[in-house]
């Protein structure tokens, strides 16, 4: 199996929702409570990430309200539209990659190709597309659909979507535009290509009205861990964002995904696996633990109970004593395996203790400890082939990011697992990934 050579940690800064990954982050004493929609705050965050040599910042997204709370206690209900936000941040940063999530279920390839090609041009080759099929069924009702399309249909559409979008990015050869003032020739018509795609889901003639992006294609990121998700990643992705809660399951996912790669004609033989990581850090292990508990204590019981009700399959727990046990639950046609896991975990715990445990990082690994302890654990994930890097999900912002940059990054550098400076070039070049040739060129 081929390996990406650098073997240093690749780091993304997961900056969705502006106040941090923890459910109570917006109540932290230092939080910018309106951070999700505050451009000045986002500029500061992006610059901090760049100071920490992060490879990219990352925005998750769904085209509907993220309904983990309906009672007024959760902050994740309003955000900025990612492409608009990243275009603005491109003007305030130099090296930082700019990765936005966009759904193949609720967009059209032509719009998507234009948006990401524009962001790549605006940012000088720093755009990345996190390709998702969307898990939130609420989105269906914003697009005239009666229901969220089936899992299998969503993934078939995603696969075709990828082919159309990359085809559109190849509309113009890299050398198509002479812009020869003296001769009066602007472009070479032989270097312009009509896609003419007709498939199961899309009928797209082309061409795109934007030249080939600086990176050829923006960096292709994928998030989705089912069988279909892994196959799509193996065929298309250069970076995979995944939720892994412990070292052993991360190693298993890493191995499984990399073993699938040789089946496909890929541009880059390898891909980078980045689990999400929610780090609670401090000068000592005890201080980190204390900070963790402080934030946990800020989860309003109404929010905790609402999130827990959602996790157990939509059973309303609000009439039960929060300091009493989880009641017996009626049958649900929701996620059975998760329900069983929660029921087992609930033994001996109160409802409050249970939601505190379950809502910390929502499936992503949590590391609590001193700067050194967390850096060592991160290095272990790299060297034992559980991860090529992490999407860092600071529990609260801006403090959780600033502290990571000022204290954990130097520890990682001391351990020799993190870069000391940015490499020149585009996002893809910095990650050691080849620029895709056009399907119309000889090498492509
Ligand atoms: C780590 C991770 C992050 C995801 N982020 C998003 C997101 O930001 N927006 C979204 O609509 N779906 C997101 N998804 C959901 C996927 O798009 C997908 O539709 C859903 O999880 C089903 O994928 P799977 O069954 O292959 O895991 C994410 C999934 C994973 C595993």
Image (cartoon, rainbow, N blue to C red):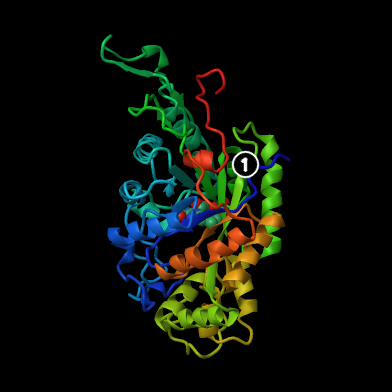
Picture quarter containing residue 47? bottom left
Residue 369 position within the rendered picture, expressed as x and y whole percent measured from the top left: 59, 75
Q: Could you tell whether 104 is left or right of 90 in the image?
A: right
Q: Could you tell whether 30 is left or right of 251 in the image?
A: left
Q: Could you tell whether 248 is left or right of 223 in the image?
A: right
As rendered, which of 344 and 277 lies closer to the eye? 277
Residue at far top of view = 183
Residue 293 position within the rendered picture, expressed as x and y whole percent measured from the top left: 51, 82
Quadrant (top left/top right/bottom left/bottom right) for the N terminus: top right
Residue at x-position 34% and y-position 65%: 77
Quadrant (top left/top right/bottom left/bottom right) for the C terminus: top right
Label 1, residues with CA under 10 Å away: few <14, some 14-19, many ≥20: many
Picture quarter containing residue 245? bottom right
As rendered, which of 327 and 265 lies closer to the eye? 265
Q: Mark 1 points at which residue?
A: 234
> 170 above or below 331?
above
Q: Is residue 420 visible?
A: yes
Residue at x-position 34% and y-position 48%: 143
Picture quarter containing residue 2? top right
Residue 400 position within the rendered picture, expressed as x and y whole percent measured from the top left: 45, 69
Residue 128 position within the rendered picture, expressed as x and y whole percent measured from the top left: 45, 44
Query: Would you say the beta carbon of the disc 1 residue lies within 8 angstroms of ligand 1?
Result: no
Count of numbered circles on the image? 1
Q: Is residue 334 visible?
A: no
> 395 above or below 12?
below
Residue at x-position 61% and y-position 70%: 372
Where disc 1 sits, the SS reads: helix
């Amino acid at each position: 199996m081929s390996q990406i050579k650098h073997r240093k940690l690749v780091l993304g800064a997961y900056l969705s929702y502006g106040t941090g990954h923890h459910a109570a982050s917006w109540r932290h004493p230092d939080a910018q409570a309106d951070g999700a929609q505050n451009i000045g705050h986002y500029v500061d965050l992006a610059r901090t990430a760049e100071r920490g040599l992060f490879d990219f910042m990352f925005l998750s997204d769904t085209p509907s309200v993220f309904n983990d709370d309906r009672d007024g206690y959760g902050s994740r209900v309003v955000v900025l539209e990612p492409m608009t936000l990243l275009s603005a941040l491109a003007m305030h940063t130099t090296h930082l990659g700019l990765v936005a999530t966009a759904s193949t279920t609720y967009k059209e390839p032509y719009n998507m190709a234009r948006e990401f090609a524009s962001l790549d041009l605006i940012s000088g080759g720093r755009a990345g597309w996190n390709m998702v099929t969307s898990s939130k069924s609420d989105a269906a009702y914003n697009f005239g659909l009666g229901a969220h399309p089936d899992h299998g249909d969503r993934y078939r559409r995603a696969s075709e979507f990828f082919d159309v979008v990359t085809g559109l990015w190849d509309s113009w050869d890299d050398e198509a535009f002479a812009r020869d003032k003296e001769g009066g020739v602007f472009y070479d018509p032989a270097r312009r290509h009509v896609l003419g795609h007709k498939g199961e889901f899309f009928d797209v003639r082309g061409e795109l009205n934007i030249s080939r992006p600086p990176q050829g294609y923006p960096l292709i990121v994928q998030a989705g861990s089912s069988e279909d998700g892994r196959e799509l990643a193996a065929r298309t992705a250069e970076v995979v964002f995944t939720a892994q809660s412990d070292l052993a399951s991360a190693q298993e996912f890493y191995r499984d995904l990399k073993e699938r790669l040789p089946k496909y004609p890929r541009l880059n033989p390898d891909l980078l696996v980045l689990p999400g990581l929610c780090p609670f850090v401090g000068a000592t292990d005890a201080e980190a633990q204390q900070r963790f508990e402080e934030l946990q204590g800020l989860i309003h019981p109404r929010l905790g109970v609402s999130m827990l009700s959602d996790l157990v399959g939509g059973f309303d727990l609000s009439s039960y004593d929060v300091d009493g046990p989880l009641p017996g639950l009626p049958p649900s046609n929701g996620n059975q395996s998760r329900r069983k896991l929660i029921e087992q975990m609930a033994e001996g715990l109160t409802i409050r203790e249970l939601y505190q445990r379950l809502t910390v990082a929502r499936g992503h690994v949590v590391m609590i400890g001193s700067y050194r302890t967390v850096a060592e654990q991160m290095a272990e994930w790299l060297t034992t082939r559980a991860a090529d890097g992490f999407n860092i999900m600071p529990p609260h912002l801006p403090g959780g990011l600033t502290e990571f940059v000022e204290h954990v990054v130097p520890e990682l550098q001391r351990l020799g697992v993190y870069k000391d400076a940015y490499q020149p070039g585009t996002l893809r070049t910095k990650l050691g990934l080849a620029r895709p040739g056009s399907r119309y060129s000889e090498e492509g």
